[in-house]
Each structure stands twice: as structure tokens, then as C-alpha cells.
Amino acid sequence: VALANEPALLLADELTGELDSATADKVMDLLAALNAERQLTLLVVTHNRQVAARARRQVLIADGQLIEMEGSHA
């Protein structure tokens, strides 16, 4: 996968929102591989709990307020 300028951070806002679950899994597998191979930091915004569950760290925001944080800070 080619990413212009080899970024250290990739922002993904509802990247899997309109995808079927099998395709969403493939996209998330690709992002996980980029994270592992290139030490690429990912910031993923999603309403899908299955997508969120794949994250090392989760932050829940509702009505503009931080509700909950889970996971590693590493």
C-alpha cells in the first residue's frame, strides 16, 4: 500500500461506515498491518463497536463530552 509522504499519523473518519462487515474487516486488517509494519499511528472515528473493539485504545465521546477511556497508552 502506498501512502503519500509516509505519514506518521493516519486519520480515518467512518472509514468502514458504508461497507459490509467482510469488507470492513479487510480494511481494518490492512490498517492493522500498516500499524505493525510502519509504526503508523491510526486515529479511527467510528460508530461501529466491532471496529472500535480492534483498537488498542478506545475513547468514547457523547454530546461533545469524554465519557470513557479504555486500553493501553503505549
Image (cartoon, rainbow, N blue to C red):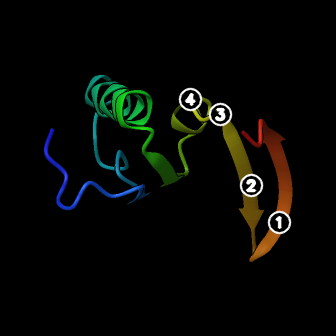
State how far apart marks 1 and 3 are (Cα). 18 Å
Q: Are marks 4 and 2 in contact (CB under 8 Å)?
A: no
State how far apart marks 2 and 3 are (Cα). 13 Å
Q: Hey, which quadrant is residue 29 in on the image?
A: top left
Please tell me whether mark 1 or mark 3 is closer to you in this view. 3
Residue under circle 1?
66
Q: State which quarter of the image contains the N terminus.
A: top left
User: Which residue is more in the foreground, 45 or 31?
Assistant: 31
Please tell me whether mark 2 or mark 3 is closer to you in this view. 3
| Of the image marks 2 and 1, the number of the one nearer the N terminus | 2
- Where is residue 36 shown, x and y percent of the image? 43, 28
Residue 40 in sight here: yes
Vertical placement of residue 51 versus 41, above or below: above
Residue 60: image tag:
2
State how far apart marks 1 and 4 are (Cα). 20 Å
- Where is residue 38 shown, x and y percent of the image? 36, 37
State how far apart marks 4 and 2 are (Cα). 14 Å
Q: Are marks 2 and 1 in contact (CB under 8 Å)?
A: yes
Mark 3 crowdedness (10 Å alpha carbons): few <14, some 14-19, many ≥20: few
- Residue at image coords 35%, 45%: 16
| Of the image marks 1 and 3, the number of the one nearer the N terminus | 3
- Where is residue 45 shown, x and y percent of the image? 52, 56
Under circle 4, the secondary element is loop
Vertical placement of residue 13 versus 27, above or below: below
Mark 1 crowdedness (10 Å alpha carbons): few <14, some 14-19, many ≥20: few
Residue 54: image tag:
4
State how far apart marks 3 and 4 are (Cα). 7 Å
